[in-house]
Image: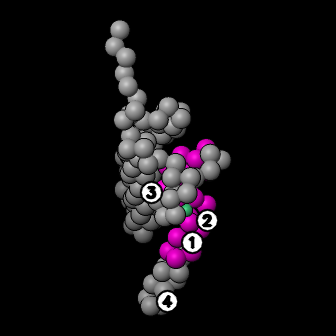
Amino acid sequence: MITKTTKTGPRPKFAAYRKILEKKADEVRRSMSAQKAAQVVARLDVPSDEGDLSQQHHEEWIFLNRNTIDMKLLREIADALHRIQTGAYGTCMECEEPISPKRLDAVPWARYCVACQEAIAARIALGDYEDEYQEA
Ligand SMILES: [Zn+2]
């Protein structure tokens, strides 16, 4: 029988997370194709007489936006799977402290610990605020 050494492979500790991440990636992919199908059906259902263009555009925007979020999530999951492989998984990429199992259970693709995530989110929120301010 072949005995595999797991020294360079994923840590068994994170094997469960790998399964969760792979399952989640599958779900997102499936939901994306379901949304695509629903969008095609919705298009066929649109009455051709008084087609409300702005409503149509709004729906397209929501669809694209949701798709972008799904794409981002897929990328996050792929990155997390990669980190499991390299052994970097479960470690905050900012302060290099271990991410709590509680957080990993809630967000298995988390890159940062709660404290760093909050600090980063605050910076992003600040950036968004400035953008809005300039555009207004
Ligand atoms: Zn951190």
Q: Which residue is mark 3?
A: 69
Residue closest to the far top: 1
In the rendered view, would you say 125 is above or below 80? below
Element under label 3? Answer: helix
Q: Position of residue 32 (x, y in %)?
A: 41, 45
Between circles 4 and 2, the one closer to the viewer is 2
Element under label 1? Answer: helix
Badge 1 amino acid: Ala
Contact (Cβ within 8 Å) of mark 3 with mark 1: no
Between circles 3 and 1, the one closer to the viewer is 1
Badge 4 amino acid: Tyr
In this picture the colour scheme is one colour
Contact (Cβ within 8 Å) of mark 1 with mark 2: yes
**In this picture, residue 106 sits left or right of residue 53:** right
Q: Position of residue 101 (x, y in %)?
A: 62, 45
Query: Dot 1: few (<14), some (14–19), or many (≥20) neighbours within 10 Å?
Result: few
> What distance separates the C-alpha of mark 1 from that of mark 4?
21 Å
